[in-house]
Amino acid sequence: MSILKSGLCVALNDEVLIKLRSNCIRTNVDFLCKDPEQIVNITGIAYKDVISIRNIILAKYSSMIVDGGDFYHSIIECSTILSSGIKSLDEILDGGLYSREVTEIAGDIASGKTQICLCTCGSTLTRGIQTVIYIDTGAGFSARRILQLTPNCSENFVSRVHVFDVTTIYELLSVLDKILALCKDGKLDFYKRLNLLILDNVASVVYPCLSNGNIVESQGLISLLSQKLKYIATGLSVAVLVTNNLVKGEHGKKVASLGRVWLNVPNVRLTIEQNDQYYKTTRKVMVTKNNRGKIGGSCTINFTEHGPIQ
């Protein structure tokens, strides 16, 4: 809590404030932790004034009481679990991608990250009237591939997915601002029904600003990007799926790129790697971070050229 200030109420004037501070009562917490009679004895302040100050502090700074059952139901109503369209992947994700969370897929180039994004996009579009925003940084979006990955997805799904092509972090931030504004405005049905935002691939737009030599600016841009993604996830109850690259970290171990500023952004992180050098279409996916569950789970998926991921 903040420090005690004169003028908080009529009883808390400069004279009373001096008496409190001279007895090491400087913050609201210090005041509330002491018994009112004890404060009267050590400061000489009138008892009715102590009670008046105490009531004002409690009224102004205490949290509102919320019924546990009502809070639980409000969370359930605004929470959604979206299937990735890959059964084995959903199993290690405790059902799929959760709204209000940022899920990251980190892997090497051509490891299958975009294929998983397209499959998740198609799977989401097969459910009712849900909509998807796909932010594409490397021309990886393919409507034809979505139809191959999710045969149940009707061809009119195009009206329920908006694709934004971005090449710089500034364009990306501008697109995110536009999405936030349209969602808050609430006039367009598409943004009212938004359930999934996919950003594929975040590293390709961040790398150029990391190489400009201005560390402070680049770290600030990454921090701003992470704040916007987090707000879209939590503030709009949207599932956010981001792909990232792997780089060599300490002791040669591969880790997600973008450094420590980005490290705590994803709620869930999946690492994808080639499972066997002789089977180029097989990948192993591991849960390397999970804020709400266990880590270490893994599955093997097979990328087929003209059909669903198995």
Image: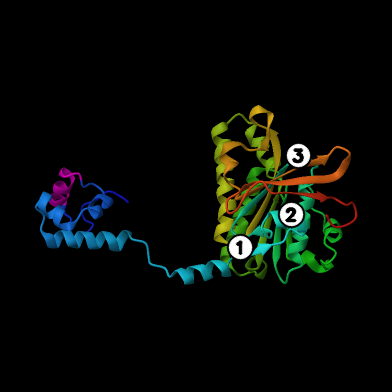
Q: Earlier in the sequence, mark 3 or mark 1?
A: 3
The label shown at residue 108 is 3
Q: Residues within 10 Å of mark 3 (few under 14, many from 20)?
A: some
In magenta, the rendered stretch is: 14-24
Residue at disc 2, secondary structure: helix
* Residue 102 appears in the figure: yes
Q: Amino acid at mark 3?
A: Asp
Q: Amino acid at mark 1?
A: Leu
Q: Earlier in the sequence, mark 2 or mark 3?
A: 2
- Is 40 on the left or on the right of 80, as rendered? left
Q: Do the numbered discs 3 and 1 sit on residues whose CB atoms are within 8 Å?
A: no
Q: Is residue 135 magenta?
A: no
Question: Closer to the observer: label 2 or label 3?
Answer: 2
Question: Closer to the observer: label 2 or label 1?
Answer: 2
Q: Earlier in the sequence, mark 2 or mark 1?
A: 2
Q: Residue at x 81, y 68 (%)?
A: 156
Q: Residue at x 63, y 34 (%)?
A: 210
The label shown at residue 89 is 2
Q: Which residue is mark 1?
A: 182
The Cα atoms of the two marked residues, 2 and 1, are separated by 32 Å
On the image, which quarter does residue 277 sit in? top right
Residue 247, x across and y down, in percent: 69, 34
On the image, which quarter does residue 158 sit in? bottom right
Residue 135, x across and y down, in percent: 71, 52
Q: Amino acid at mark 2?
A: Leu
Q: Nearer the viewer, residue 141 or 214?
A: 141
Residue 71, x across and y down, in percent: 48, 68
